[in-house]
Amino acid sequence: MTPATLELLAPAKNADFGIEAIDHGADAVYIGGPAFGARANAGNSVADIERLAAHAHRYHAKVFVTLNTILRDDELDAARRIAWQIHEAGADALIVQDMGLLQLDLPPLQLHASTQTDIRTLEKARFLQDVGFSQIVLARELTLKEIAKVSAGLIVAPPSPSVPLPEGEGRHTPATLEFFVHGALCVAYSGQCYISHAHTGRSANRGECSQACRLPYTLEDEAGRIVAHDKHLLSMKDNDQSANLAALIEAGIRSFKIEGRLKDLSYVKNITAHYRSLLDDFLDQAPAFRRASSGRCSYTFTPRPEKTFNRGATDYFVNERQADIGAFDTPKFSGEAIGTVTHLAPDCFEVDAGAPLHNGDGLSYYDSHHELVGLRINRVDGARLFPMQMPDDLTVGTALYRNRDQEFERALERKSAARRIGLHLQLSETPDGFALTLTDEDGITARAALPHAREPAKHAERAYAGLREHLGKLGNTIFDATEISLALSQPWFLPASAVNGLRREAIAALEVAREAARERPARRIAASPAPTYPENELSYLGNVLNSAARSFYEKHGVTLIADAYETNSEKGEVSLMITRHCLRYSYNLCPKQVKGIRPDPMTLVNGKEKLTLRFDCKKCEMHVIGKLRKGRQISIVPVAP
């Protein structure tokens, strides 16, 4: 039985970040293209995508490009042209949200369903698989049981051997299940958040989220009593599934996605290396699985996820509902706890630090208003810290956190990883000289010949040692000599220059052979007849912004289709967010937990803004209700019915 592949999928703000992600162990990276990505400020040129793909493909790693906003009719042709340019640049898949794209003349690239497609059910997952998606990312809110149900339901019987399949990925192959394992969490179901558009005219579904979820709110009950004051009640801690990888694999996840296309390089290096190490530890004990790309990584640092930006850690709903999932105190990075202030002086303060501190470290603390405040350490002298500017509100007993470890950051500013593909080198004799045969860890081979007179060596051991030394000089390549065999009838003398030339020729031939052996992922064949969408009506939650998307859903049995929220057709109050996070549960006011409590509406207040909270206790969901602000709407013409 062929081992199943496990893929580590890392974010790339740009090509350089993507290259570092590959070097630190990613099997694939996802990156924005020239336009229409869900991170409007993380676009990249086609030339940069081509450069990234060339580097990734040397390791048989992949590059997925995001084309995952909803599109206006006048943007469809531009999106189609970008898709073809991305294909020609060597990308391996398109990540899309807008189903209108499936109605266009797209290149034969794999299609991956974006997190914005909001996949929470087996029915939705099966539909997307059957219309041609090869990989689908499940909603971050799912539990292990819910993931396992989707995985089990996607397995379909193979076709009859008498019915040949056309060229491409077969319909009998289940779609690969992808899941976010690390990074920021959106409080709303992805693709179902409209508060940014309602309040600012910037649509999250068009890559311009204003992050209203990170604002402070006061929570009032139905009688106007304050339950929580000035807290970041819609701000979640960051996702961290480090402890759940084996359970996720058992549930059916095969691609492990790291959030962060806007994060800095140290985050990409650190978090990619962290999950690469965890997955390698699992794979070393699990012969039923294999890596999705080639090479093993070595690092100049020890990965420490807590050292780079995070809002605290939660595994969210993977192990069922938990109370402590919110980052209610601050949406900022407070850092690791390092001690408390023990003494104050005019230009310095002393701490009882539980870890070594360094010049240049960044510290944070909560001031008297419980706001997170930061400071930078200029000089460390034992327990005494000399900040660049002495804060006025620091007091004895204040708890301190470190949100920038200067020594750790400097290690990541330098070259911090090497990725090498294991290689067996065999030197043998030919009728007119010698040949070097290379076999890499994937079983790909290459051979180079060296016509050369065979001259017996005067010192056998020295000759063998010299041959091994020069054959193993792979420092400037992506390979590592795991074994060197000398299939020789006797020790021969070969000049170092000849051996080096033979090795370089063989390595060049192996690179060509590896590229020839690399299979570009095939586009999935859509099921025939066309599958029926799980619902026959779509509200504004369907995100239908163009006529092509409308035609797509009509083809798949949807009879009533509303315009996307971004058309401003919804004038009254609607659900601007739908969340599994529930503030009643967070504050022990859940009717399922406390007898006699009713799920009455509550109110979130931010300045003059008031948002109603309604609770669907049957589904365990909270709806944040609001409407379009006057003067905040962007002008998008509704699609023609």
Image (spheres, rainbow, N blue to C red):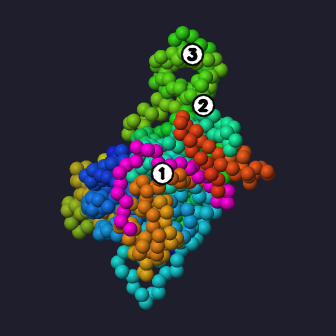
Q: Residue at x 29, y 69 (%)?
A: 105
Q: Position of residue 28 (x, y in %)?
A: 41, 56
Q: Earlier in the sequence, mark 2 or mark 3?
A: 2
| Nearer-the-camera pick, 229 or 390 | 229
Q: Residue at x 43, y 78 (%)?
A: 530
Q: Circle 3 is placed at which residue position?
A: 349
- Circles 3 and 1: CB distance less than 8 Å? no
Marks 2 and 1 sit apart, C-alpha to C-alpha, by 36 Å
Q: Which stretch appears magenta?
A: 617-641
Q: Earlier in the sequence, mark 2 or mark 1?
A: 1
Disc 3 is placed on an element classified as strand
Q: Circle 1 is placed at which residue position?
A: 194
Q: Position of residue 628 (x, y in %)?
A: 47, 48
Please say whether residue 628 is one of the residues in the magenta stretch.
Answer: yes
Please say whether residue 512 is one of the residues in the magenta stretch.
Answer: no
Q: Quadrant of the C terminus?
A: bottom left
Q: Position of residue 446 (x, y in %)?
A: 30, 64
Q: Which mark is residue 23?
A: none
